[in-house]
Image (cartoon, grey):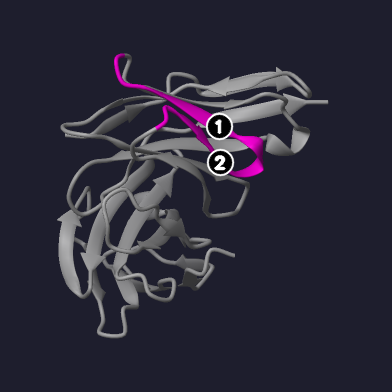
Amino acid sequence: AQSVAQPEDQVNVAEGNPLTVKCTYSVSGNPYLFWYVQYPNRGLQFLLKYITGDNLVKGSYGFEAEFNKSQTSFHLKKPSALVSDSALYFCAVSSTGFQKLVFGTGTRLLVSP
Amino acid sequence: DSGVTQTPKHLITATGQRVTLRCSPRSGDLSVYWYQQSLDQGLQFLIQYYNGEERAKGNILERFSAQQFPDLHSELNLSSLELGDSALYFCASSVLGQGTEAFFGQGTRLTVV
């Protein structure tokens, strides 16, 4: 069975500093990994995904994520945080076959001015 | 705008009642997914349809059912509603293919009183 763990309920970072939101996964076969962001009273917005290839994936709004197969991790990163990045971030995984995205519990990112 | 349309945006109903949530997927997307987001359960996968057929089932209660119609829109039916069914219900759609991302609607907020 697929599963995703986001060990931090909340991450606090000052504007301008780098940020990391952690995600580890468990899946049979090759993983397809995704990050989504949710703003208040909104649906989830796709940020980036890893399918294969380069372990560093670049996505929307300056976000990137690093795939590490040995550590089964897919951490979300941004070199310089903005206050407007404050939101709820979800990591998700699927595997081969018809897609069924399994989500982590979400990490709230708070960026202070 | 993700291209996925959900109606209604808000729904308030009494315990024991039945409601229908509607989803129109992005143009060209054959897969539709339903998710439930509640404070204590996080984002839970309910069910997936592909081109009218059920493809995967998650933690969907027997009181809940869904279908996808020939025009690819989908409906989620919730019956014998309980207070605990109050949540945000999301529909998402994607094209068929391994590793393709899903695009989410804005959700329907259901409040059972």
The residue segment tinted magenta is A54-70
Amino acid type at circle 2 is Gly
Local secondary structure at mark 1: strand
User: Is residue B102 in sight in this rendering?
Assistant: yes
Q: Which residue is mark 2?
A: A59
User: Is residue B62 in sight in this rendering?
Assistant: no
Q: Could you tell me which chain the residue with mark 2 belongs to?
A: A
Q: Position of residue B29 (x, y in %)?
A: 36, 70
Q: Is residue A60 magenta?
A: yes
Local secondary structure at mark 2: loop
Instruction: Tell me if residue B41 comes above or below residue A98 in the rendering.
Output: above
Residue under the image location 67 percent in, 23 percent down: A79
Q: Which residue is mark 1?
A: A64
Amino acid type at circle 1 is Glu
Q: Disc 2 or 1, which lies upstream in sequence?
A: 2
**Which quadrant of the figure has residue B51?**
bottom left
Q: Position of residue B56 (x, y in %)?
A: 17, 55
Residue under the image location 78 percent in, 22 percent down: A16
- The crowding category of the residue bearing disc 2, from other C-alpha atoms within 10 Å (few below 14, some 14 to 19, many at least 20), is some
Instruction: Tell me if residue B75 comes above or below residue B95 in the rendering.
Output: below
Q: Could you tell me which chain the residue with mark 1 belongs to?
A: A
Q: Position of residue B105 (x, y in %)?
A: 49, 63
Residue placed most toward the observer, B10 or A5: A5
**Which quadrant of the figure has residue A49?**
top left
Residue placed most toward the observer, B93 or B19: B93
**Which quadrant of the figure has residue A108?**
top right
> Residue most toward the bottom?
B71
Q: In the rendered view, does A35 fall on the left or right side of A42?
A: left
Whether tag 2 and tag 1 are in contact, CB under 8 A, the answer is yes
Q: In the rendered view, does A9 fall on the left or right side of A29?
A: right
- The crowding category of the residue bearing disc 1, from other C-alpha atoms within 10 Å (few below 14, some 14 to 19, many at least 20), is many
* Quadrant placement of the C terminus of chain A: top right
